[in-house]
Image (cartoon, coloured by chain):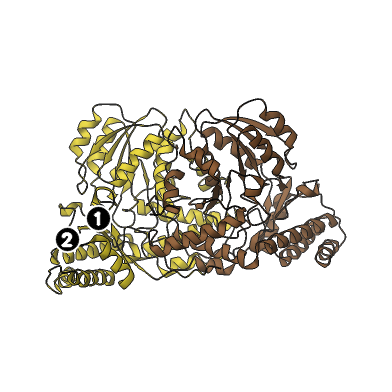
Chain colours: A yellow, B brown
Amino acid sequence: MYQLNPPQRILLGPGPSDVHPQTLQAQALPLIGHMDPAFIQIMNEVAEMLRPVFGTKNHLTLPISATGSAGMETVFVNLIEPGDKALICVNGLFGERMTDVAARCGAEVTRVEAPWGEAIDPAQVAEAIKKDKFKVVGIVHAETSTGVKQPLEEIAKIAHDHGALFVVDCVTSIGGIPIEADKVGIDAAYAGTQKCLSAPPGLSPVTFNDRAVDVIMNRKTKVQSWYLDLSMIAKYWGGTTRVYHHTAPISSIYAIHAALRLIHEEGLENVFARHAKNGLALQKGLEAMGLKLVVENPDHRLPELTTVYVPEGIADAEVRSRLLHEYSIEIGGGLGVFAGKIWRIGLMGHSCRKRNVLLVLSALESILSGLGYKCEKGAAMAAAEAVYAG
Amino acid sequence: MYQLNPPQRILLGPGPSDVHPQTLQAQALPLIGHMDPAFIQIMNEVAEMLRPVFGTKNHLTLPISATGSAGMETVFVNLIEPGDKALICVNGLFGERMTDVAARCGAEVTRVEAPWGEAIDPAQVAEAIKKDKFKVVGIVHAETSTGVKQPLEEIAKIAHDHGALFVVDCVTSIGGIPIEADKVGIDAAYAGTQKCLSAPPGLSPVTFNDRAVDVIMNRKTKVQSWYLDLSMIAKYWGGTTRVYHHTAPISSIYAIHAALRLIHEEGLENVFARHAKNGLALQKGLEAMGLKLVVENPDHRLPELTTVYVPEGIADAEVRSRLLHEYSIEIGGGLGVFAGKIWRIGLMGHSCRKRNVLLVLSALESILSGLGYKCEKGAAMAAAEAVYAG
């Protein structure tokens, strides 16, 4: 029968990231029941540790029992009723996915677009929102397909002035850059565990403020998904007496508990500073190697996910395959319009370490040089070191 | 910050069951990426090990990345289009849930009912199916709320004679009793990992035969759930080139891989025999204690989940609370019409051991005797031992 013997990788792709050994060990703990008083306490602690990472005091903050895309679906399936209008910002694959998910919930979707690799311009949102009565404005905070960091405050204000709910995809931002949901005015957000939180994939943290909860509680139609219906899930996660809905994924909850504890022990500010510094070091290193970053505006670059063009004459798949098989380093390829054209290098959570910056820069330099790409030997590592020194 | 230190339980409720240490350790293995060739191989092995547990050769057999209730939703959301007619058999909470899920997918639901604690009578299904053109007949194989084992063959034949798809909830049957999907004629089924497979909750194995796949591929409308849309998931799990859909829950896949390996190493027939024997021993023991089993027909009793009435004058909650806090044994209470009236004692997967039968019988005898319940001391354990001896 099949033995389970997965190779040991260094995960520097767009997620999953490397998981801290303490978090992995949490998943080896024996299970308890999903209605056990001891488990209810663990759930409460998870919710309490999640809120500051979202930058919120929202009561309705919990991990949905499925991966990040199910978090996206949770937000739309609960907020949207057939015929509602949604204004969705699209500058990458996950904005695109948001339009698909919203439409499947019965939303009439209007798109505001920016080229892949650029942020959405608030002026365009302000213009588009005038043309109809939108219930929801949706946007991606950290576009995993492009590496773009989206400024949120102006667009939040535009949405609120219009009376719309502001919905944000925080899958790749949570734990890597500040979200500040309450300060920004995010009404509903969803995230993933397998990026900067460095827990295994399997849960999607979500948060809803009172305004969003009011919308959910005053729906005229039933939520089309039983599994993601927050009116029931909330009674399991947050009621005074807990009502069984589905069997919570116990081991995954142990893992997010352990991962969140590690984040709070390091301190959120320190975690963000670590991501900022390592991301910058990687980006300076890649530029010193003569490579071109996809995101031109430095203010819109995600520190946790760097996107870089594959240099001319170099075969994308060969480089990634050699990184994986010879160096055991995983980086990501491009998706959609960027397929074959860019690499996506993640420095997320436990993967976000100086060691990994130096490893991936030197491995890339070796492989590219071997393929005839011209670059000054050692320049990348020196540029990275300069960031750490300075 | 919060330490994670869950108590060590003996899980004899309706699931989750105890997880074998080897399966727990599989979850402590470092992660690899969801598109890593090594992970694709692990996925293939999981599918291959799942098929015989369902009793099928169906190509489209895979674990959905969410718990069992999401498996139910996967089946209905993919097979049903708005206005389709579904005949659903209801003799417990999970049949009830099936009507809710199907209706949320736009199905017009007709119910065939039996009292909680009894199996569905095929004659009633034959009568009801004449009255309309049903696309789907849905039924629960192992009703977790009542402990009833549902015979399937006759009802499968009735559904097929009518031209309907036969859909079966195998959440609590998989790995505990034979399913024999191909032989019975099950067109689509969903299951859970946290019962007799003894993997942690978080995945829902599903299987669809060619007839069901044809229906999915010839839909006129888009599947209303993006996350559960099999036309996309199938390309990630089974395509010749794998197309990214969502990030698979890596650690959970490791766990189901390890759990399935343990089952096949023991041998499926041996696993079923172990469940049959321990279940019978528990049931004989409870009866020897003077307790009354909920399911009167012995042929309709699940070995993996025994339901028994709380004796008159005994407080349900007190007994379960003392079992949990003094003996660290979890058993389940009643749901729905059975709330406060029955106990549900699971012997599932790794929990299904003679040790646990003796532990729960003697703990129950001690607690009940202490509360003034009259029963012959040691009779329960003797009756159980007689089953093992015989």
Callout 2: chain:
A
The quadrant where residue A381 appears: bottom left
Three-letter code for the amino acid on which mark 1 is drawn: Gly
Of B159 and B257, the residue lying toward us = B159
- Which badge, 2 or 1, is on the more N-terminal residue? 2
| Distance from Cα at disc 2 to Cα at disc 1 | 11 Å
Q: Residues within 10 Å of mark 1 (few under 14, many from 20)?
A: some
Name the residue that disc number 1 marks: A340
The image position of residue A103, as x and y in percent, is: 37, 34
Q: Which residue is mark 2?
A: A311
The residue positioned 64% from the left and 51% from the top of the image is B172
Q: Is residue A234 shown above or below B112?
A: below
Locate residue A15, reporting x and y percent: 35, 58
Q: Nearer the viewer, residue A239 or B292?
A: B292
Of the 4 image quadrants, the one containing the C terminus of chain B is bottom right
Say above or below: B308 vs B389.
above
Residue B32 seen from this side: no
Q: Say which element carries label 1.
A: loop
| Side of A373 where A198 appears, left or right | right
Element on which disc 2 rests: loop
Is the residue at mark 2 from the same chain as the one at mark 1?
Answer: yes
Mark 2 residue type: Pro
Q: Examine the rendered structure and indicate whether residue A195 appears above or below residue A132.
A: below
